[in-house]
Amino acid sequence: MGSLVSLDRFDLKILDHLQRNGHCSNVELAAAVGLTPSPCLARMKRLQESGVIRGFDAVIDLARLGHFITAFTEITISEHRRDSFRLFEAAAERCPEIIECYNVTGGCDYILKIVAPSIADFSAILDNLLELDIGIIKFSNRIVLRQPFEARKMQLALTGG
């Protein structure tokens, strides 16, 4: 986790607007947050350079591309040492179907979000992970039946700074 970045109300307004409309021009963004374009662009660049803004991605509707399954897989590893965690995380990151990985508390060590073209492909991904001998001692899967909503925007407190 990187160091915390101090944000004022204009930074928070910029972040809030970009979450809703990341494809807007700098002129549109500046008008929306109450700045002129030059200082708005400087703030946006600072937010990018500091790592607060990590990128601008297209959100793809997989259902329109064909049949995909999404699964959440809980993983427990055998040894709770830094090297064991690094080994597992490096292997998970090399698997393109694993699109999110969380180190968590509770009954397991990791939760993975896996997107695969089919159940057979999903099963092969799990088999491949097990064959890597990276300390997995237990896993449990949850297959997503449907996604009622997806909130890609987070409410930012406009009172900070």
Image (cartoon, helix red, strand yellow):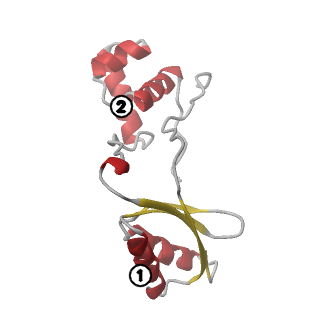
Is residue 21 rendered to the left or right of residue 8? left
Residue visible at 48% across and 22% down in the picture = 13
Q: Give SS at disc 1.
A: helix
Query: Compared to 81, does 73 lie above or below?
Result: above
Q: Quadrant of the C terminus?
A: top right
Q: Quadrant of residue 55?
A: top left
Name the residue at the right extreme.
106
Q: Is residue 5 above or below residue 24?
A: below
Between 107 and 120, the one lying in front of the other is 120
Say whether residue 132 is left or right of residue 151.
left
What residue do we see at 42% from left, 41% from top? 50
* Residue 96: quarter of image: bottom left
Say which mark, if any, is on residue 45. Answer: none
Identify the residue at image location x=36%, y=21%: 40
Is 156 or 112 nearer to us in this picture? 112
- Which x, y percent locates residue 52? 45, 40
Element type at marker 2?
Answer: loop
From the viewer's perspective, tell me whether residue 4 is left or right of residue 63.
right
The x and y percentages for residue 113 are 49, 61
Q: Is residue 45 above or below residue 1?
A: above
Of label 1 and label 2, which has the lower sequence position?
2
Position above or below: 136 against 97:
below
At horizontal 32% and vertical 42% (from top left) the residue drawn is 58
Check disc 2 and give the amino acid type. Gly
Numbered circle sitting on residue 128? 1
Q: Residue tagged by mark 2?
A: 22
Q: Residues within 10 Å of mark 2 (few under 14, many from 20)?
A: some
Q: Is residue 35 visible?
A: no
